[in-house]
Image (spheres, grey):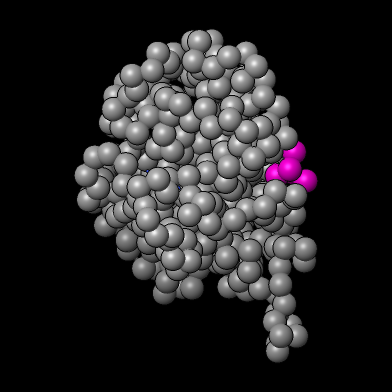
Amino acid sequence: MDKMWSGRFSASASSLLDQFNASIMFDRKLYLEDIEGSLAHATMLEKQGILTKEELKQITDGLNQVRTEIESGEFEWKISDEDLHMGIEKRLTALIGDAGKKLHTARSRNDQVAVDFRRWTLKKNLVLVEALKALMKEVLVVAEQHTETLIPGMTHLQHAQPINFGFHLGAYLSMFKRDIERFESSYERNNVSPLGCAALAGTPHNVNRETTADLLGFDSVSVNCLDTVSDRDFALEILFNISTMMMHISRLSEELIMWSSYEFGFVELSDEYSTGSSIMPQKKNPDVPELLRGKTGRVYGSLMGLLTVMKGLPLAYNKDTQEDKEGVFDAVETAEISLEILKEAIKTMTVKPHNMEKACAIGHLSATDLADYLVEKCNIPFREAHFITGRAVAKGEELGVDLSAMEFKYLKEIDERINEDVMPYLALRHSMNARTSQGGTATVRTLEQLEFFRAYITEQSEDLNV
Ligand code: ARG
């Protein structure tokens, strides 16, 4: 009968229940947020005349002592204490006596856990922003070296139009920028303090929620206590943000896997970030991008898990909510290591421009340019131009040559109106550089885009130093 809530019980909880009910094995990750939350709460209680100066001093010293014990590994985490909140409070009371018992005045574990988990999650949004910026930097380095390297742009995984490799990587930079914006906006939206909401309805004690919000670095105080103690949107948001980011990482991984195959041969992953086969001595496997692709599924699982936990809960706190943490911890850890390893894999991979350009000479990538030429220079309506180009492609297939290498006489045979000035239009580099519309692949446009991303991550670093 050593439970903090045992007053109304006449028999002890079974050890099976203890095991089932406890979260202390995983929520101990939040120990720093819990201690900081308690320090802020006690400071406010003293300011409001609810605790004496002496009691505050004892609580502060005691909590600092508990922190030291936790960090040195001395602290005993007991399943029978149920969660970290009670484990820490119990140890505090053992250390300082009666003052420890006053700490929970005007507070409930419901607002306590909401504070701890929210602050932990908020910080992780910013950690992931930093990690994304570091990844963007490495992608930018490669992109900037390859603004003239031709690569087949595809739709339906079929050769479509020539683009440059820097432009291709620029697409991922756009995705990562949106990911950063999502983490930042979640940070801002959820930066409100739950402390002082108590169990669900507020408290009759004369607390000052602004004081604790300030001490804990929250921007403001939450508006409605009933909502706040059962709100896990901040956890859902980080899971969604990570899921979307992992989806982007997974798409890039898929391309890295294809590009490093013999069929493509566009990149070679470094030995440091590749693995071998236990039976086939010749093999070099892209385990890193494969695992990144695989882990994406696991992160989606955590998002769906928590959405499902939350969907049927009546207001306000329900114990189901305790299931919110492990999925978030796991997803954040997965995101952190994924960003780090992808960054290293990109930094150390070898790009093979020769193979990329060779691949562009297959599949008549400049066909659209021939049609555009017919429209622009011969005044032929686009539909007809499309048909004539189709015949030129068929001729190329028959001769076994790509449109970009076809002799002029064959084109003239197909349509009298075609003149010799068509030839530059068929060249692949010309085709890429002709796409000068805003956001297009032309090298000049690609350079603009990459400059934009470089400025963005530089600005970002300055912002966050403030
Ligand atoms: N361990 C609990 C959790 O993680 C803390 C809140 C418990 N509140 C309660 N009324 N049982 O959600």
Q: Which residues are magenta?
A: 68-72
Residue at 57% from the left image edge and 17% from the top image edge: 43
Q: Residue placed at 22% from the left, 50% from the top? A: 312
Q: Is residue 277 above or below residue 71?
A: below
Q: Is residue 71 magenta?
A: yes
In the picture, measured across the screen, residue 105 lies left or right of residue 76, that is left
The percent position of residue 127, horizontal first and vertical second, equals: 60, 37
Looking at the picture, does residue 180 appear above or below residue 371? Answer: above
Left or right of 304? Residue 26 is right
Q: Position of residue 373 (x, y in %)?
A: 38, 43
Quadrant for the C terminus in the image: top right
Q: Nearer the viewer, residue 119 or 375?
A: 119
Name the residue at the front extreme: 10
Q: How many numbered discs, if any? A: 0
- Residue 335 is situated, as x and y percent measured from the top left of the image, at 56, 50
Q: Residue 7 falls in which quadrant of the image?
A: top left
**Foreground of the two, 391 or 111:** 111
Task: Please tell me whether residue 104 belongs to the stretch shown in magenta.
Answer: no
Residue 207 can be seen, yes or no: yes
Instruction: Report the residue that reaches farthest toward the bottom.
Output: 279
Is residue 438 in sight in this rendering? no
Would you say the magenta stretch is mainly helix, strand or loop? helix
Find residue 315 and report its image quarter. top left
**Residue 69 placed where, x, y %?**
73, 43
- Residue at screen point 62% across, 33% down: 97
Q: Quadrant of ligand 1?
A: top left
Residue in the picture at 67% in, 24% down: 58
Whether residue 224 is situated above or below residue 276 in the rendered picture: above
Of residues 272 and 28, the one drawn nearer to the viewer in this rendering: 28
